[in-house]
Image: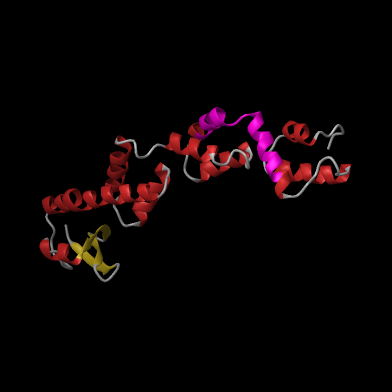
Amino acid sequence: MTVTKIEPVTKTRFQVYVDEHPAFVLYKGELSRYEIEPEGELDKEVYEEILQKVILKRAKARALHLLNDMGRTEAQLREKLLQGGYPDRITEEAVAYVKSFGYLNDGEYARSFIEGRKNRKSRTELYAALCRKGIDRETATQALEEYYDGEDSRAAIEALLRKKKFEPDTADYAQKQKMAGYLMRKGFRYDEIRRVMEVAEPY
């Protein structure tokens, strides 16, 4: 194995390339300790020692810090670690590590996310948001079934009507039709909208 390039990331951190591929990021003192220099040879044993004793330890600590900072999905945590220069294998080991302690749980994240937004977002909007955050479809659907019902839809619609300063009791048919179209585009179903706005005529 050959160290083909050492590229500064910051004043104290350096991206090390092994056989033309990014391998890991080390501090200046670690470069000296392992005698890593451009065009130098790197024993496989030393390479594995760096990964396991230095990089993995750092990745686990980083993962815990990121989760302590704010709730994240598994996909979001994985992306942050990869962006930080951690190799794929180390990233997966760090993710598995925090999952083993229950610090990372997409199901719990989805339920918490829904609980805090169900009174102002439609089920469709919440589902799309969870998918964008990397929650798989099955987990998102299951969480929505647990935490979202007709009463939640009513509360969310009423909250949007208040935000828009819309009064169903005084609005005419054309105004109700326009508002209903807006709510349907937000992901609410026709029957949910009609129950809240109490419109006898079809939109």
Residue 150 drawn in magenta: yes
Q: Is residue 73 above or below residue 137?
A: below
Name the side, left or right, on which 202 lies relative to 43.
Answer: right
Name the side, left or right, on which 191 lies relative to 141.
Answer: right
For the point 78% across and 47% down, the residue is 166
Q: Position of residue 167 (x, y in %)?
A: 80, 44
Q: Position of residue 96 (x, y in %)?
A: 30, 39
The quadrant of the image that shows the N terminus is bottom left
Between 132 and 192, the one nearer to me in the picture: 192
For the point 74% across and 46% down, the residue is 182
For the point 29% across and 35% down, the residue is 100
Q: Position of residue 185 (x, y in %)?
A: 71, 44
Q: Looking at the magenta stretch, what is its main secondary structure?
A: helix
The quadrant of the image that shows the C terminus is top right
Residue numbers of the magenta segment = 140-160
Say how the picture is coloured: secondary structure
Residue positioned most to the bottom: 11
Residue 152 drawn in magenta: yes
Q: Is residue 13 above or below residue 128?
A: below
Between 71 and 77, the one nearer to me in the picture: 71
